[in-house]
Amino acid sequence: MRNIVVEKGMSADGAGAASAEQGGWRVAPDEERRPSLGTMNASIPVPKTGLWVRRFLAFLGPGYMVSVGYMDPGNWATDIAGGSKFGYTLLSVILLSNLMAIVLQALAARLGIVTGRDLAQACRDHYSRPVNLMLWFACELAIIACDLAEVIGTAIALNLLFGIPLVYGAIITAVDVFLVLMLMQRGFRTLEAFVIGLLIVIFGCFIIQIILAAPAIHDIVGGFLPQAKVVTNPEALYIAIGIIGATVMPHNLYLHSSIVQTRAYERTEEGKRSAIRWAVTDSTIALMLALFVNAAILITAATVFHQNGRTDVEEIEQAYQLLSPMLGVGIASTLLAVALLASGVNSTVTATLAGQIVMEGFLHLRIPDWARRLITRGIAIVPVVAVTALYGDQGTNKLLVLSQVILSMQLPFAIIPLVRFVSDKRKMGAFVTPIWLTMLSWVIAGVILVLDIKLLVDTFTGA
């Protein structure tokens, strides 16, 4: 269906009009609207009657795909360092960052369901072409940075489990291109099932880790309560900023606003309200799983390393080497590496989809999935191979930190448009966010941006 929109005072053929408004959106004249994710859009049926459980299960999936980004290899180093240096103190920061993520992902789902646009399409229909090109470029950098973290994490896991050198491990990660393609060809539900299966593996590994570490419950509860040390201790504050900065992933906002539209909910006001309710429930439960995984990494580091005087453990390889000897259980280190491998592989699925959504949304340009994946993975592999060959393992750890810095730099370009769109009554109509949620969203955006700016300044100044 062609969507021809005309400005006031302009002729019906749109002559001389560069853009027009409809419901608060700037849309190019004669532009054909494409649904997000093409044929996958509205491909999963939603029962209209019956038990609520059936409707909930129909919406179960997108939240878990989004949660992958909140427990990817980029988060592991900050969680390990926080636990080994400060015990359980920074659990409150993990909780705070997770609550922020829950709010932002709920806004992304609301945008996609109400407007029928993912965040990239919404930006295209609101901003001018030069601004859109800038936003697209910034987002592509973020996806490449995310892919970089996945390559490094997967390569480290392959090295720890099978002794494969990091250089070869990085090259092997290119094979996942074919895995992702195979899953996508079998339908979106298959893709979701694969992601959830690996999340169960990760969850299971850390359940066992927590049981083996046997932390004191009262210490864990105390860690979830905010403490002044987080702010007054500069080193604790720096790690806290790193945890928050590495938690909210910008590509997840684009991803979530798209994949919630794979459900065939009724595109009526009542149908959209129901869809928002179930989608937010799905993402909230899934992000609580991410909270458990990140907290489990920190708790394990606090129990095994901090309480035994090892406050210098900052890297994944260090944790792997020390975990089994200090716990006295041989399988402990293996479980850590298995969870890391599952996390790295899982993240490739969401990065692929996010890349497709961003490219199609901003540019209306679609290239074959295999080409898209090879390009982004190739760009990520090259620096990993080069840095590893020149500087060894220490170089890859610095590269991992750099990838998180790049992600932090992209956050404003995703969060600010999102909050702006969902709080605009012209765009959202009856679904515009209430004043309290709008204020809360801007506060969250402000906190994240200020902390990320500080993280960037400290990183580049060596503070």
Image (spheres, rainbow, N blue to C red):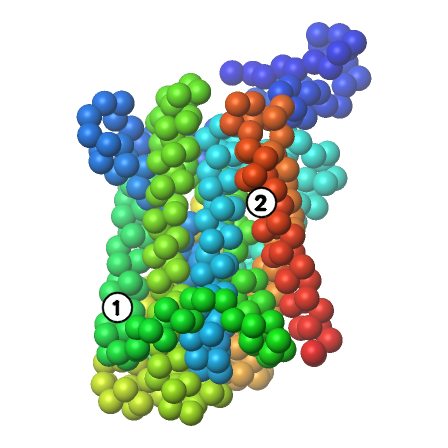
Q: Amino acid at mark 1?
A: Ile
Q: Amino acid at mark 2?
A: Ser
Above-or-below relation of 436 to 213: above
Q: Quadrant of residue 52?
A: top left
The local crowd at label 2, few if under 14, some if 14 to 19, many if 20 or more residues have their Cα within 10 Å, is many
Q: Indicate which disc residue 182 carries.
A: none
Instruction: Kindly identify the residue that appears in the image at 76 percent across and 19 percent down.
Output: 17
Q: Nearer the viewer, residue 329 or 93?
A: 93
Q: CA distance from mark 1 to mark 2?
A: 33 Å
Where residue 347 appears, as percent x and y from the top left, is 41, 58
Q: Is residue 112 visible?
A: yes
Q: Indicate which disc residue 207 carries.
A: 1
Above-or-below relation of 61 to 288: above
Looking at the rendered image, the quarter that the C terminus falls into is bottom right
Instruction: Kindly identify the residue that appears in the image at 38 percent across and 38 percent down.
Output: 279
Question: Given contact means CB atoms under 8 Å apart, are the residues at marks 1 and 2 in contact?
Answer: no
Q: Secondary structure at mark 2?
A: helix
Where residue 241 appears, as percent x and y from the top left, is 58, 67
Above-or-below relation of 328 to 396: below
The local crowd at label 1, few if under 14, some if 14 to 19, many if 20 or more residues have their Cα within 10 Å, is some
The answer to whether 447 appears left or right of 367 in the picture is right
Q: Quadrant of residue 2?
A: top right
The answer to whether 257 appears left or right of 237 in the picture is left
Number of disc labels: 2
Where residue 202 appears, as percent x and y from the top left, is 30, 64
Instruction: Kindly identify the residue that appears in the image at 37 percent across and 55 percent down.
Output: 288
Task: Give the labeled residue for mark 2.
Answer: 441
Q: Secondary structure at mark 1?
A: helix
Q: Is residue 175 visible?
A: no
Name the N-terminal-most of marks 1 and 2: 1
Where residue 9 appears, as percent x and y from the top left, is 79, 9
The answer to whether 277 appears left or right of 136 in the picture is left
